[in-house]
Amino acid sequence: MNTLKKLFGGEPRQFGMLFALVALVTFFQIRTGGLVLTSANLMNLLNGNAYILVLAVGMVLVIIAGHIDLSVGSVAAFSGIVVALALRDWGLPPWGGVVLCLVLGVLIGAWQGFWVAYVGIPAFVVTLAGMMLFRGANQFLGKSNTVPVPPEIQYLGGGYLPTHGADLGLNDPTLVLGALGILWLVAATLRARRQTLRLGGEVLPPRVEAVRLGLLGGVLAWLTYQFASGRPGTSFPVPGLILAALVLLYSFLAGRTILGRHVYAVGGNIQAAQLSGVETRWVTFLVMVNMSLLASLAGLLFIGRATASGPFDGVGWELDAISAVFIGGAAVSGGVGTVLGSVVGGLVMGVLNNGLQLMGVGTDATQIIKGLVLLAAVAFDIYNKRQGRPSLVGLLLRSPRHAVPSRAEPGGGGSEEPSGAGGPSPALRETWELLAVGAAVAVLAAALYLPGSGWRLGAGPEEGQVWAGAADGGSGFAPGSLVGVCLPQKTSENWVLAERLFREGLREAGFRGDVQFANGGVAEQQNQLSAMVARGAKVLVVGAIDGSQLGGQLREAREAGVRVVAYDRLLTNTPAVDYYVAYDNYKVGVLQGEALLEGLRRRKGHAPWGVEIFAGSPDDANSQVFYQGAMSVLQPRIADGTLVVRSGQVSFPKAATPGWKAENAQRRMDTLLAGVYAREPLHGVLAPNDTLARAVLTSARAAGKEVPVVTGQDAEVESIKSILRGEQYSTIHKDTGALVRRTLLTVSALQQGKAPEINDDRSCHNGVKVVPAYLLEPKIVTQENVRSAYEDDPVLRRIANP
């Protein structure tokens, strides 16, 4: 027990966080059958959380300085879309895109830092405005579309260090980096020990220090082996290398430079810092600039991993980064925190999320658990500080001497040694240390591009090569294998029903099923796919949030021999998709357009008719297909004056409804009715689904307007009732049960090694190839046929025929 006390400091209860972390990893390792600590899952953990950890590195300095930055997610998204457009449309080379991204981050940080530091507006207000400003700018520049990025950028966000020389089964750059890390650990520990003894401080006994070094060195050696011995084409991830360089650099800057001590001083006691001669405004300005710089870098890493920039990138990232910082031991009041602690805090949340995904826990329960863990960790840490004990996280990262000034010493105490201690001056020593850190960072960066090495994204087909088994059933797999189903957010009844039908259908077919909703967005779905591959899934059924931002995960799935079936939404800009099962979405749009014209003729007298166009979410590939089908019918009538769109909002970007959210549709409808249609009648609205149709009708009733002719889709219960009441004019019936059954037949055929049945091998081009598809026929439903349409439906017949 005394040895443990010396090793970690204080009483045993003070290092409970260490035991909690070990218990957490052990629990998930046992419950998942050893999947957490495999090479593949460790790589997924690092790749999937790197962008959040980069944000945490910057956010901890902001919070230490007594501020907060809510704009980081939007800044990351804005930088990502600018880089993607510059590379695609401006002819900028990849290295130029990287430079542009970082410069853009600096400029944004300078803009926000000016208002905070020199105008005196609180950072919360400035960055809240920045969050809205740069989110809107992202969607404006990208026209709410996804924009793919080239392989060089994909390499930064999801690549691996290449092997040099003979392939002996271990990646040599990874081994070299691991060896350098162990040597650095030993050298840094011995150097700190000598300095502490020279200053008359207390150090650990040699044997205890040796045990500590042995434990940490052993962990580093084991991790090095795991990353070096992964499947062919993988090694230590490039995002992990970038993160390691940032942690090394910023830990030095925060703990061993005058600027770092000034950051702590400003956050600890700004008045005392000013009296001590600290230029507090300049420090605040630099902290804000640095945060936006790292946010832009995080955005670059994310679009590289996602293979494209999307309109909803960065949503909620600021909350993840702030959570990581507080779990890592930072104080809400400022002046306390470490870079390494924040990275550890982010990894704790990442491990928790990953472990729950590997166990098949749903996203709803995962969010609840993560929230409770965050609250418990911070409350436990605050309790220990109030009891006069050091931060638990700080104990885990305990160093033989203090590198960070206390809040009681805002100036940092000046020199680390007495003036008469001899040796080089503090300024000279700091200069040499900065050069040493810079050299180490340069070594890490050089590992990305060693002469003659080239870069790689992992094993895959050469240009022009066809994926084996993509056009047939392949070799099949064992009955009872795992089938992963990734669905988007719970925004409509059909997705909720699909979840239940998939669970039941997979169980009845003899498969092990893992059905997940990606309520957290694209990043959540990326992590879910990686976790399903790590669990050994043989088939992935993917209903994508954004079908163009899963290319990296689908590529890794294909490399692992996993077959991919796109469900309802086509997966675009990737060769790693085998089959597509959906309704004929173009025909859905055609039927909606025809229904709108028919309803106007029947209910609104003679033309011309005032109408408005609503489209689906821009990150859903089906939205544009629905829109194109409908406009093929409506555009000629707009051109000849039969239909009049008084708002002028006809193009898809202007008509799109972000996130398929009812509140967005209702807000837009409220604005149109109060403005353009204040004195003009609105006769009809093209609504792409039932949720948005009901939002439009709610807005019309609230404004006291005559009910317009409104289309819909999905045959939701409330919309069927609305059609029976004569309110909503039409919906599109797409039997979710039939779609799920057809998908399960496709999975069963793949399991048996047979080619699944398809009925379309020409029209479903995803930007890379034509995807073999089975397209089901949609059916229009109005008040005239609603009763007969559902007389055999086990659920809706009670609604349609009460």
Image: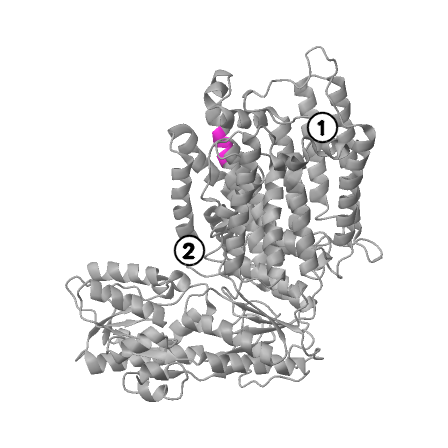
Q: Which badge, 2 or 1, comes first in the chain's sequence? A: 2
Q: Is residue 456 visible?
A: no
Query: Could you tell me if the residues under marks 2 and 1 are in contact, i.e. CB atoms within 8 Å?
Result: no
Residue 175's spot in the image, x, y percent? 79, 48
The segment highlighted magenta reads: 284-288
**Marks 2/1: CA–CA distance:** 50 Å
Classify residue 8 by image quadrant: top right
Which quarter shows the C terminus? bottom left
Residue 286 on the magenta span: yes
The residue where tag 2 is placed is 139
Residue 112's spot in the image, x, y percent? 43, 37
Q: Give the residue at x 71% y 10%.
A: 420
Q: Give the residue at x 31% y 79%.
A: 730
In the picture provided, is 643 more to the left or to the right than 567? left
Q: Is 411 above or below relative to 488?
A: above
What amino acid type is highlighted by mark number 1? Pro
Q: Is 61 above or below relative to 633?
A: above
What amino acid type is highlighted by mark number 2? Gln
